């Protein structure tokens, strides 16, 4: 079976449905957030949408919504809250993305988006971050450059040369 692909239009349609069918507050992160926000050509294999209350009922509601949309439950990921909640002050780093009839969906600020996945920083993750930094530059938007560089400096050393290079590229992109 070929992997699913969510483009900006498919993500937007799913989010609109989520805003009308789910309850509470939700946060969109990852490739879906990139596509919906700053990288219109970006596609992703899943939608990382996390309930801010962090309840099991939210996770189940998201899975039920996926099934109602004829999507495999693997197409939605609500477990990324583990990574979000490890970041100090994450709750202050949310921007309204969509308000549905029942749910409100946020996206991360540029700072929070950049902080997420620093330790993993795959080539796609780096591309997303460089695209966002360029968008911030073009639109005069700011992000906490020192916080990103500090986050990179606190990471454990790695034997993976490619990862070290990606981290250095991101650190350089965060220079004033």
Image (cartoon, rainbow, N blue to C red):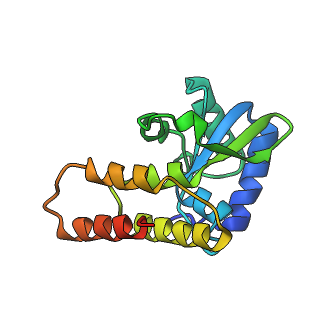
Q: Residue at horizontal 45%, vertical 34%?
A: 88
- The relative height of residue 119 versus residue 26 in the rendered view (above or below) is below
- The relative height of residue 145 versus residue 56 in the rendered view (above or below) is below
- The relative height of residue 137 versus residue 68 in the rendered view (above or below) is below
Residue reaching furthest right?
A: 101
Q: Which is nearer the eye, 165 or 43? A: 165
Q: Where is residue 39 in the image (x, y as percent from the top left)?
A: 61, 70
User: How many numbered markers are drawn?
Assistant: 0
Q: Which is nearer the eye, 105 or 43? A: 105
Q: Residue at horizontal 73%, vertical 66%?
A: 9
Quarter of the picture containing the C terminus is bottom left
Q: Where is residue 93 in the image (x, y as percent from the top left)?
A: 58, 42
- The relative height of residue 7 versus residue 70 in the rendered view (above or below) is below
Q: Where is residue 109 in the image (x, y as percent from the top left)?
A: 59, 50
In this picture, residue 85 sits left or right of residue 39: left
In this picture, residue 15 sits left or right of residue 77: right
**Quarter-wise, where is residue 26 in the image?**
top right
Residue 90 seen by the camera: yes
Residue reaching furthest left?
A: 159
Residue reaching furthest front?
A: 176
Q: Position of residue 139 (x, y in %)?
A: 67, 69
**Quarter-wise, where is residue 132 in the image?**
bottom right
Residue 116 seen by the camera: no
In this picture, residue 17 sits left or right of residue 88: right
């Amino acid at each position: 079976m070929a992997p699913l692909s969510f483009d900006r239009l498919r993500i937007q349609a799913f989010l609109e449905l989520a805003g009308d069918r789910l309850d509470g507050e939700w946060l969109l992160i990852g490739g879906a957030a990139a596509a919906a926000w700053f990288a219109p050509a970006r596609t992703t294999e899943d939608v990382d949408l996390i309930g801010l209350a962090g309840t099991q009922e939210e996770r189940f509601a998201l899975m039920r919504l996926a099934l109602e949309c004829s999507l495999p439950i693997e197409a939605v990921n609500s477990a990324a809250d583990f990574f979000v909640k490890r970041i100090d002050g994450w709750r202050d780093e949310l921007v309204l993305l969509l308000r549905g009839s029942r749910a409100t969906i946020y996206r991360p600020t540029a700072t929070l988006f950049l902080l997420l996945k620093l330790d993993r920083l795959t080539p796609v993750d780096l591309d997303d971050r460089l695209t966002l930094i360029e968008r911030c530059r073009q639109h005069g938007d700011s992000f906490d450059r020192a916080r990103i560089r500090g986050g990179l400096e606190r990471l454990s050393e790695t034997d993976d040369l490619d990862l070290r290079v990606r981290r250095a590229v991101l650190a350089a992109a965060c220079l004033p």
